[in-house]
Image (cartoon, helix red, strand yellow):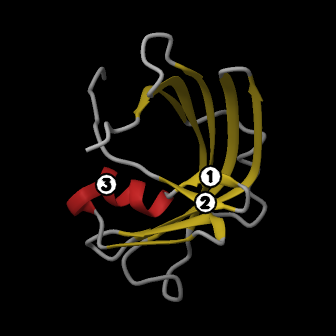
Amino acid sequence: MGKTARYKTRFVPYGDVYIEDRMFRERQRLGANVRLVEWDQSNPNILTVTRPDGSIRETKVTKRSQEEGGLAGTISEFSRVAEMPPGGMMEATPMLSAQRTRTRYKLSEDNPNEIEGLELLTTYGPSTGPTAGFVDGEPTFTVKFRIKLTRPSPQ
């Protein structure tokens, strides 16, 4: 609680907009706790992380909304998360859960090179049943993050 995490992220072109490079972010965020990160800029909704022990976590964004107004905005993403133990997808049944990420952001009043925001990550599940109703269920937990994106100074 109250810990600060610092890592780099970057944004890449996607059509006529820019999107966060999720593969770059996860490599920066997880460091040595990741063996392989897979993400395709042309299909940005799927992120697959393989941990050093061989376990796999696949996150697939299934619903996204975004609103912008003036110097502020909100983003909401709902994702299906599949956790596979060491041994891979073919040898084990994945454990399914869901998560919702809600972010509110605004351009900093003090620094035009900074964006400040709050992010709520709510997790539902896990469930292994084919008719898992975790979407309508109670959240397992919610984590609140204060975020700050700072554009690096030109070198």
Q: Earlier in the sequence, mark 3 or mark 1?
A: 1
Q: Position of residue 100 (x, y in %)?
A: 64, 41
The mark nearer the N terminus, 3 or 2, is 2
Give the alpha-carbon distance from disc 3 to disc 2, as whole Å: 20 Å
Mark 3: give few (<14), some (14-19) or many (20+) Cα within 10 Å.
some
- In the rendered image, residue 90, in percent from the top left (x then y), is placed at 53, 88
Specify the quadrant of the image occupied by residue 33: bottom left
Q: CA distance from mark 3 to mark 1?
A: 19 Å
Which image quadrant for residue 66? top right
Three-letter code, disc 3 = Gln
Within-10-Å neighbours for mark 2: few <14, some 14–19, many 20+: few
Do the CB atoms of the residues marked 2 and 1 lie less than 8 Å apart? yes
Which residue is disc 1 drawn over?
18
Mark 2 or 1, nearer chain start = 2
Q: Is residue 136 above or below residue 20?
A: above
Residue position marked by numbered label 3 in the rendering: 28
> Looking at the rendered structure, which numbered label has been put on residue 8?
none
Q: Is residue 136 above or below residue 130?
A: above
In this rendering, which labeled residue sits more in front, label 3 or label 1? 1
Residue at point 56%, 36% (across, down): 140
Residue 155, horizontal then vertical, whole percent: 25, 44
Q: Residue furthest left?
A: 32
